[in-house]
């Protein structure tokens, strides 16, 4: 479950009517959560915050790929003939 700090909640009507103020708030807070009908609907953030999130996701993805490669390297290789024999084919 995601916890949204109350001071980061922005109503959709504020975004529509007071975009300049909302934009300034985002510059300070780096992120805001836009609510519509009292429910989270959108996320707005600075480009710097977005870049950091993307970089973190890419690092996680690369770590997972690295882990899979390392696991594959340690797997025992079996010849086609042995595999067929083990499967009794």
Image (cartoon, rainbow, N blue to C red):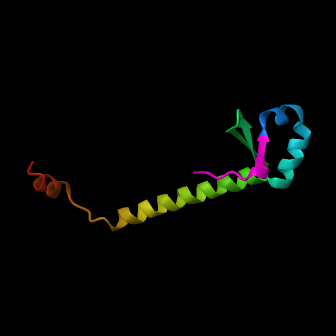
Q: Which range of residues does the magenta coloring cover?
A: 1-10
Snapshot quadrant of residue 61: bottom right
Relative vertical location of residue 43 with respect to residue 59 in this rendering, above or below: above
In-front residue for pair 73/47: 47
In-front residue for pair 8/78: 8
Q: Is residue 39 visible?
A: yes
Residue 41 on image: x %, y %:
68, 37
Q: Is residue 31 visible?
A: no
Taking the spot 70% from the left edge, 39% from the top edge, the residue there is: 42
Snapshot quadrant of residue 57: bottom right
Residue 39 on image: x %, y %:
67, 38
Residue 7 on image: x %, y %:
79, 51
In-front residue for pair 36/31: 36
Position of 28 with respect to 58 (left or right) is right
Is 67 inside the magenta-drawn segment? no
Relative vertical location of residue 59 with respect to residue 44 in this rendering, above or below: below
Residue 15 on image: x %, y %:
83, 36
Position of 72 with respect to 16 (left or right) is left
Taking the spot 61% from the left edge, 51% from the top edge, the residue there is: 2
Taking the spot 78% from the left edge, 53% from the top edge, the residue there is: 48
């Amino acid at each position: 479950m995601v916890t949204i700090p109350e001071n980061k909640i922005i109503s959709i009507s504020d975004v529509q009517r007071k975009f300049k103020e909302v934009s300034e708030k985002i510059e300070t807070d780096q992120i805001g959560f836009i609510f519509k009908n009292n429910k989270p609907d959108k996320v707005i953030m600075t480009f710097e915050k977005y870049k950091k999130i993307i970089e973190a996701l890419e690092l996680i993805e690369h770590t997972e790929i690295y882990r899979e490669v390392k696991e594959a390297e340690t797997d025992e290789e079996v010849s086609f003939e042995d595999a067929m024999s083990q499967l009794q084919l």
